[in-house]
Amino acid sequence: MDGHHKRGPRGPRPANRRSNRPKHRGGYWSNKRRQWRKRQQGKMEAQQVGAKDEEELYEEVEEDQEDMTVSHLADVEYFEAYDQLEVHALMLEDSQRLGSYLAAIRAHDLKDKLVLDVGAGSGILSMQANGLQDKVTILTGRVEDITLPNKMDIIISEWMGFYLLHESMLESVLIARDRFLRAQGRMLPCSARIWAALVEAEDLRLDMANYEDFLGLDLRLVGEQQLAARTAEPRVEEVHGRRILAEPLVAVDLTDLHQLRVEGTRNLEAQLSFRTWRQGYAAGIAFWFDVGFGRDVILKTDPGSPPTHWKQTVVYFGAFPAVESGDVLEANVVLKQSEENPRQYNISVETL
C-alpha cells in the first residue's frame, strides 16, 4: 500500500544523544492553518449551539491541537519527505537492498498468495505500472486507517531506517500484522538485529589535536568547542573496517517479528562489553543492522558488506580515550523513541 516508508530527502540525522526537537517545515505551517480554522469553527459552534462556554470550547480545541503536534506533525513532515522522487531513486539504486528482497520473494514463492506491501513507495516490491493492474490494488492512506476485505498470507515491507529504527515505521508494520495477517502468515523480513562496534576516528582526532599548537598558539578551547559541535549528534557515515577496535556485538536482537509487540521497540537498552583488538583511540560506537527473511536470506549493512544507502550510524564520545590491545570498555546503550517526535529516537551511550 502507498504510505509509510523510510528516510527523508536529505537523509535526516538520527536523534540527538540529548534532546532533538523536531524541525517542522511546510507541514508545520499547514497544520497551523488548520488549527486556526478549527478555532474559528469552535467559536461558531459555541455561539450557535450554546452548549458550552466559548472559552471552554476554545481551550478544548487548543488541547486537541497540542496532542496532535506530537505525532501528527511528525507524520506530515514524514510523508511530505517522500513526495520527493530523488528519495525513491536513491533507494532504487541500492542493489543490496533490492537484491535481498528479490532473493526473499523467490525463496518464499509468493505465487497465488495474498500479499500486503506496507509502504509501497515507488512500487518496486508490488510492481506497479507493469501490466499487473488486475493483480495489484493500490490503497492510499495510513495502514492504521485502511480496511481490507481479506486476511493476508504475506506482509512484505522495507521499513528499516538508519540504525534500523529511525522513523519508527516498524510500528506501522506490526499494526498491519495484527490487523491483517492470517494465522500462520509470514512477514518479510521476519527478524532484525542492531549491531554495535567500538570505533576510532583518526581524521577527527588529528583535526582537533591541531588546535593544541595552532601557528604557535594554544587554541585548545576552540578545539573543544569544535569537537563538541561535531559530535553533538550521531552521524550517518560509511565506517571503514579498519576503524573498528573490537569485535562487533549484537546490541538488540528482534528475533521474531511475528511475536514482537507493537510498542516493543520504544525503549531498548543494552549493556555492552568490548575487548579491544589493538592499540588505538576510541572515538565512539558505530551501529548498523541486518534483517533476516528466513531460508538463509539476510540483508546486511555492516562495514564489511557491500555498501547500502543506510551506511552506518556513529555516536561519538566527544573524547578520544587511549586503549591498548586486550582492554575492556563497557558501555550502556539506550535507544528511546522521542516523545517530541516519535519518528526519531534519542540515543545515549554511557561508558562505564
Image (cartoon, helix red, strand yellow):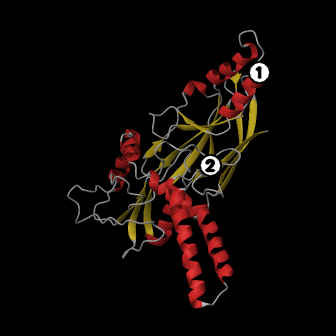
Residue drawn at the location 61% of the way across and 62% of the way down: 70
Please name the amino acid that badge 1 sits on. Answer: Arg
Residue 44 shown left or right of residue 225 in the figure: left
Residue 95, x across and y down, in percent: 37, 39
Q: Residue 182 carries which label?
A: none
| Above or below, comparing residue 49 to residue 11 in the picture | below
Quarter the N terminus occupies:
bottom left
**Circles 1 and 2: CB atoms closer than 8 Å:** no
| Above or below, comparing residue 159 to residue 305 in the picture | below
Image quarter for residue 209? Answer: top right
Please name the amino acid that badge 2 sits on. Answer: Val
Q: Which mark is residue 252?
A: 2
Residue furthest toward the left? 131
Residue drawn at the location 73% of the way across and 29% of the way down: 225
Question: Dot 2: what SS?
Answer: strand
Nearer the observer, 156 or 347: 347
Nearer the observer, 250 or 164: 164
